[in-house]
Amino acid sequence: MGMRMREVPAQDRPRERLLDRGAEALSDRELLALLLGAGLVGQDAVELAGRLIAQHGGLYALSRVPAHELVASLPGVGPAKAARVAAAFQLGRRAAVQQAPARRVSGSADLAAVASPLLRGLRHERAVLVTCDGAGAVVHASVLTDGASDRTLVPIRDTLARVLALGGVAFGVAHNHPTGRLTPSEADRLTTSRLAAGAEAVGLRFLDHVVVTDEGWRRVPPD
């Protein structure tokens, strides 16, 4: 049996090492262990973290697993641990949005760059709304809908209402294809047409609609 966490010298424990040397000094499983907080009988948090990463095929694959699937995926991973792990990955995605390379949308590529951090690495469908001012500067980028299995992924009226509420002048929409397929569907193309028509009716400028996958993006033309 390996050494338990309480038997490890304090200066070598993940939390103490992070505080002393910074998060960059820790391995993936040590960082994950800090989120898990504790292991279980006969297995410390670092060992449990390593098993969790391995079971899901790596850290990136783990980042795509919904919290409810993490629960009891291994003995010792309950609702509290699963929620902390899922929350950490989501915070990472949101932080990435703030560092998006394009903070002004002048074309489809800029729209994809701003929206991608909120769309990549997901196993469910999501739509993102990017609201801009008259010069194309990003006012706000946020999730529009999530996992829309029983409703329209991009509700036209709600989208326009949110842009107006944010004081936006222009907007673009992006959504993901969890399958990795970049080809827009007929429904995607129809959504583009409806967004363009709705924007014109209320005096907004519709910038574009793009599909984003983990490998790239593609513009969705109107129907």
Image (cartoon, grey):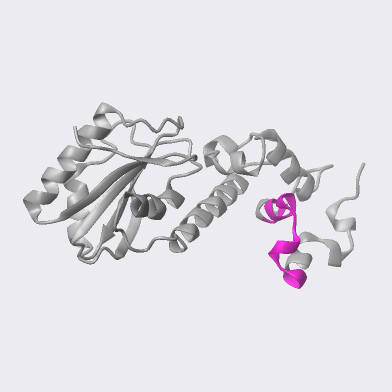
Query: What is the x, y in percent for residue 105?
Result: 31, 58
Across and down, in percent, residue 201 comes to 7, 49
Q: Report the quarter where the N terminus lies.
A: top right
Most prominent secondary structure in the magenta stretch?
Answer: helix
Residue name at image x 40 percent, y 34 percent:
177
The quadrant in which the C terminus is found is top left
**Stretch of the chain drawn in magenta:** 19-34
Image coordinates for residue 98, horizontal then vertical, percent: 44, 63
**Image side of residue 166 versus residue 33, left or right:** left
Q: Seen in the image, is 48 located left or right of residue 219?
A: right
- Classify 202 as above or below 54: below
| Residue at screen point 23% across, 63% down | 166
Q: Is residue 1 above or below residue 18?
A: above
Quadrant of the image occupied by residue 6? bottom right
Question: Is residue 167 or residue 208 the one in the foreground?
Answer: 208
The image shows residue 209 at horizontal and vertical percentages of 28, 44
Out of 124 and 85, give the one closest to the viewer.
124
Q: Residue furthest left?
A: 201
Q: Tell me the residue at 23%/65% (across/down).
A: 133
Quarter location, residue 22? bottom right
Residue 28 on the magenta segment: yes
Give yes or no for residue 83 being in the magenta stretch.
no
- For the view shown, which residue lies furthest in the top direction? 186
In the image, 206 versus 93, the foreground residue is 206
The mark tally for this picture is: 0
